[in-house]
Image (cartoon, rainbow, N blue to C red):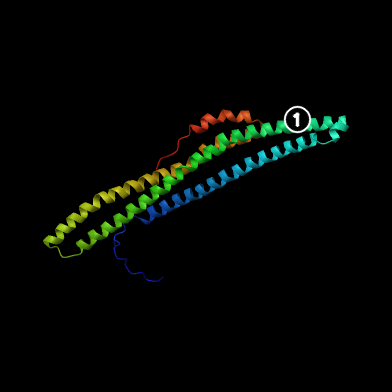
């Protein structure tokens, strides 16, 4: 291992334990993965519903094209068959439209709401990092005066540096504690939050009207504010 000289402006004292930093990086890493997965799921759900609607619309167009075919005027049996096909395709299109509307309400919109938490989380992490940098800078300043000869001016500067350090240290510790408390709680809430959505998705495949029953409990879920 190569030797790295002590960085200028960095304290010699370790102000955040390796355990705390490791725990923080682990919890934030899990949420970064969750953010990416949430975005991917929302995108895939949108593609799926768009494909469903496009398929049923195409089927309706095909049946309408067949109805305008001259064969329908010449062959009553063919006309009856195409008319039945047209009725079935329109029913399928109506079913798909209702299904997509319910999926939008019970799955896609909750995904958007869940995803809206991540920007504030990322901003809170940035504020915590800035507070940590300020903490380190002022801790290094205190250490610099502590190492100097204890003259009157030095002691005065040391006292002032310690006074400057105190609120900055408290600010970092408060931000750090809040994130360490809230990040695991937010991550663990994902199952309770999304379970109603997935149940609604399954029900919507069979009967879109059944999925409406789960909309209210889903939107009553609470999400943290970072």
Check disc 1 and report the residue beneath it: 87
Quadrant (top left, top right, bottom left, bottom right) of the C terminus: top left
**In the rendering, at what x and y percent does residue 193 appear?**
51, 37
Task: Locate residue 18, reporting x and y percent.
Answer: 38, 56
| Tally of marks | 1
Is 153 or 96 nearer to us in this picture? 96
Q: Is residue 74 left or right of residue 92?
A: right
The residue positioned 80% from the left and 36% from the top of the image is: 66
Q: Residue furthest left?
A: 152
Query: What's the residue at 62%, 28% (across, down)?
Result: 209
Q: Residues within 10 Å of mark 1 (few under 14, many from 20)?
A: few
Q: Which residue is most to the bottom?
A: 2
Q: Quadrant of the N terminus?
A: bottom left
Local secondary structure at mark 1 = helix
State left or right for residue 73 relative to residue 95: right
Determine which quarter of the picture holds residue 213: top right
Which residue occupies 11% across, 60% down? 152
Residue 28 drawn above or below residue 114: below
Residue 52: percent from left, percent from top: 66, 39
Residue 36 picture location, percent across and down: 52, 49
* Residue at (22, 53) in percent of width and height: 164
Q: Is residue 58 above or below residue 171?
A: above
């Amino acid at each position: 291992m190569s030797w790295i000289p002590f960085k200028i402006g960095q304290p010699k004292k370790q102000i955040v334990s390796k355990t705390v930093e490791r725990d923080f990086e682990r919890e934030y890493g899990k949420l970064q993965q969750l953010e990416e997965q949430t975005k991917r799921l929302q995108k895939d759900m949108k593609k799926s519903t768009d494909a469903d609607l496009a398929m049923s619309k195409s089927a309706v167009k095909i049946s309408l094209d067949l109805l305008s075919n001259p064969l329908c005027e010449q062959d009553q049996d063919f006309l009856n068959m195409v008319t039945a096909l047209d009725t079935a395709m329109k029913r399928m299109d109506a079913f798909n439209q209702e299904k997509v509307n319910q999926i939008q309400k019970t799955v896609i919109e909750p995904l958007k709401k869940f995803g809206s938490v991540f920007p504030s989380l990322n901003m809170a992490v940035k504020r915590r990092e800035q507070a940590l940098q300020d903490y380190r800078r002022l801790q290094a300043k205190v250490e610099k005066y502590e190492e100097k000869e204890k003259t009157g001016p030095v002691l005065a500067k040391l006292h002032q540096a310690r006074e400057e350090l105190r609120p900055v240290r408290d600010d970092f510790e408060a931000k750090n504690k809040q994130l360490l408390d809230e990040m695991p709680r937010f991550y663990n809430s994902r199952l309770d939050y999304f379970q109603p959505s997935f149940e609604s998705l399954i029900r919507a495949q069979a009967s879109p009207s059944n999925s409406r029953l789960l909309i209210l409990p889903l939107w009553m879920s609470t999400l943290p504010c970072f």
